[in-house]
Image: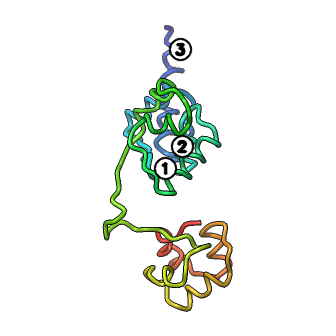
Amino acid sequence: MSWFDWIAQTTQAQSARSRILNDPYYRFQSLAELQLAASLGIKIDVNRASVDDWLRLPGLSIHQARTLTELTQSGVPLHALEDIAAVLNLPLQRLQPLAPVLLFCYYDDTSLHTIQPVDANTAALEQLTRIPTVDLYLARLIIQYRPYRNLPHLQRRLSLSSELTAQLLHYLKF
């Protein structure tokens, strides 16, 4: 390898490293980048991953990412790589290279410390008033102006402050 090739490779590796560390939505372009991300401590929590998180993985389609996200958000936990393979109807060997960045965490949904987000589009008045900072007036407004696409849409429709919206962030889903 020539000196110029070595410099080019080193510069390219540093550039990939920088993108991986600084862009939380950076899509790994290859298994080598995925291995680099794993060595940098990048992990994707399988049971809390968003569509964007799944799309970081090379070879996963938007349809597959949505399927996995929909399933975990509905309360179905994924315990191992074999579960992901079964959901996607793929051979385990196809997913094995993704394992270094996948993290299988488990959550106790019955714990008092676990926030159970409620769907802003379907929650009853009683459910909404159990959310900290949501009084009866705000709960009625939320119900009155349904449906909402997402939290920014709810914020705009109800003219909520950024502080209140930030407080609702983990308590509402759409």
Q: Are marks 1 and 3 in contact (CB under 8 Å)?
A: no
Q: Secondary structure at mark 1?
A: loop
The amino acid type, in three-letter code, at marker 2 is Trp
Cα distance, mark 3 to mark 2? 33 Å
Tell me the residue at 48%/25% (across/down): 32
Cα distance, mark 1 to mark 2? 7 Å
Circle 1 residue: 49
Circle 2 residue: 54
Q: Earlier in the sequence, mark 1 or mark 2?
A: 1
Cα distance, mark 1 to mark 3? 38 Å
Tell me the residue at 59%/81% (across/down): 160
The amino acid type, in three-letter code, at marker 3 is Asp
Mark 2 surroundings: few (<14), some (14-19) or many (≥20) residues within 10 A:
many
Rendered location of residue 24, percent (x, y):
51, 47
Q: Earlier in the sequence, mark 3 or mark 2?
A: 3
Q: Secondary structure at mark 2?
A: helix
Q: Are marks 1 and 2 in contact (CB under 8 Å)?
A: yes
User: Image check: 168 left or right of 111?
Assistant: right
Mark 3 surroundings: few (<14), some (14-19) or many (≥20) residues within 10 A:
few
Tell me the residue at 60%/41% (across/down): 64
Circle 3 residue: 5
Rendered location of residue 37, percent (x, y):
44, 35
As drawn, the label of residue 159 is: none
Q: Secondary structure at mark 3?
A: helix
Which is in the foreground here, disc 1 or disc 3?
1
Q: Is residue 87 above or below residue 48?
A: above
Tell me the residue at 55%/85% (across/down): 139
Which is in the foreground here, disc 3 or disc 2?
2
